[in-house]
Image (cartoon, helix red, strand yellow):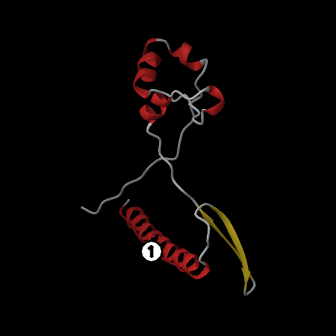
Amino acid sequence: MKEICEKFLTAKAKEAAAKEERLNAEAELVAALKPGKLEGTATIATDGFKVSVTAKLNRTLDYEAYQEMQLPDNMAFVDLKPTINLKNLRMLERLDPDTVAQCVTVKPGKPSIKVEVV
């Protein structure tokens, strides 16, 4: 087990170093290409490479302020997507699993691993 943990930690350190190197190279490319758009994709062909830089703007919504605006339906710009309330779902699963099974599909996700040197 010790060898596997050490192998995991070594691989994780290499991965972090490679990610940092990639992020630095990305920053250099963006600085060198100077895309003029705040949002959208700029593509440049140079020295045998085709480089595309996609600029993004992250937006957050003040939902209470949005609701107060009371926009008519033809001007509404927010889509509401239902999400699962995990606490209530687990409670209903204990009480009536068949009801939950009718509308919820469950599949395993990727396990998370944390190894610490002690």
The outermost residue toward the bottom is 47
Q: On the rendered image, what quadrant is the N terminus found in?
A: bottom left
Where is 107 relative to 43, above or below? Answer: above
Q: Position of residue 7 (x, y in %)?
A: 43, 67
Residue at the image point whose x is 48% and y is 34% from the top? 66
Residue at the image point whose x is 41% and y is 18% from the top? 91
Question: Could you tell whether 76 is left or right of 6 in the image?
Answer: right
Residue at the image point whose x is 44% and y is 28% from the top? 86
Residue at the image point whose x is 49% and y is 77% from the top? 24
Foreground pick, 83 / 13:
83
Residue beneath disc 1:
17
The outermost residue toward the left is 118
Question: Could you tell whether 113 is left or right of 49 in the image?
Answer: left
Q: Position of residue 10 (x, y in %)?
A: 41, 70
Foreground pick, 76 / 31:
76
Q: Position of residue 34 (x, y in %)?
A: 59, 77
Amino acid bearing label 1: Ala
Q: On the rendered image, what quadrant is the C terminus found in?
A: bottom left
- Rendering quarter of residue 48: bottom right
Tell how many labels.
1
Question: Could you tell whether 1 is left or right of 107 in the image?
Answer: left
Q: Say which element carries label 1.
A: helix
Q: Position of residue 102 (x, y in %)?
A: 61, 17
Question: Could you tell whether 91 is left or right of 108 in the image?
Answer: left
Q: Residues within 10 Å of mark 1 (few under 14, many from 20)?
A: few
